[in-house]
Amino acid sequence: MSVSVIIPTYRGEKTIGRAIASVLVQGDAVDEILVIDNNENDDTVAAIKSLMLNSSVPIHIYRVNTQGAAKARNVGLKRAGGRWIQYLDDDDELLPGKVARQLSMIKPGDEWVMGTGEMVSPDGSGIVLQLAPDPWKGIVYNGGLGDMNSSLFLRDTLLTIDGQDETMINGIDVDMYFRLLKRKTRWVQDHELCSYYYNHDGYRLSRQVLPDLIRRDAELKFRVKSFLKQEREQYYQENRVFFETAILRGLVRLFVVDAESALKAFDRYFPKGFPEKIDPLILPDSISTFSYGLLGFKRTELLKSALRKIFR
């Protein structure tokens, strides 16, 4: 089973070597590396060309004049020759044996290997994104579908959903996951640690518009709920409290960066008012939960905002 690794790069001169090195240690499990130069004018390409001299795996470089990770990945997807696709950001890395292990897990009909990744902070501490047993719950809560670096995708399946949404700057991965789940893509889960996602202080395009990312996240949770309510009604009703609380949690996060948008979204997402029940595992703050029932969403969040300013 052939594998193509797609690495979009932008300002990656200092980190692209580590990323490519982490691919090369995968050995024979990888057939080619496609580096998509995302319209950068630094020395990234020169750094890649120097790595090509001693690479045991063919490295191809393609240039995309329009900036955007989704556009770059889609260019790589169309040019890839492998049956399976491994995405990797230019400042992250795969762990040894990741690709071979996941290939060994694949059975006939499987299209997606969900992998477990670790988000590493600038101070070196890390948080492992555990995979949720139920992908529908994982997509709306706690990063339960892992990150793209940790996964492996069947190329033909990605092509059927037209790859990634090129209009998006951030939230690209969960949008793609949602479209994969809607088409009933067959998946398997790898619970061993697969990759490191470095949440460093440097440049990431997706991080430049944080309020937009949080708005998209809240909107996606609502879209998931709406889809399940219409297409899988029994499942939705059995898990309604979970999904409604996940949406509410997204609005709580949104309120901190954009109160007006959060209040408008609450009225749209909950036209009948505050949910009757809340899942304490998702919103464990019992005081806030009590306040929501007593004061409602707007007054509770305004009160919390005032308290944050007082005790800052």
Image (cartoon, helix red, strand yellow):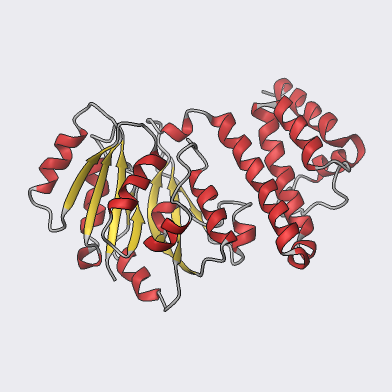
Q: Nearer the viewer, residue 118 or 161?
A: 161
Q: Nearer the viewer, residue 27 or 170?
A: 170
Residue 161 on image: x %, y %: 48, 55
Q: Quadrant of the N terminus?
A: bottom left
Task: Name the residue: 41% across, 56% down.
Answer: 159
Q: Quadrant of the C terminus?
A: top right
Q: Residue 155 falls in which quadrant of the image?
A: bottom left
Residue 170 shows up from this direction: yes
Residue 309 on image: x %, y %: 71, 21
Q: Nearer the viewer, residue 84 or 218?
A: 84
Residue 89 on image: x %, y %: 35, 45
Rendered view: 131 above or below 107: above
245 sits to left or right of 81: right
216 sits to left or right of 153: right
Task: Name the residue: 22% across, 62% down.
Answer: 31
Task: Name the residue: 63% across, 35% down.
Answer: 215
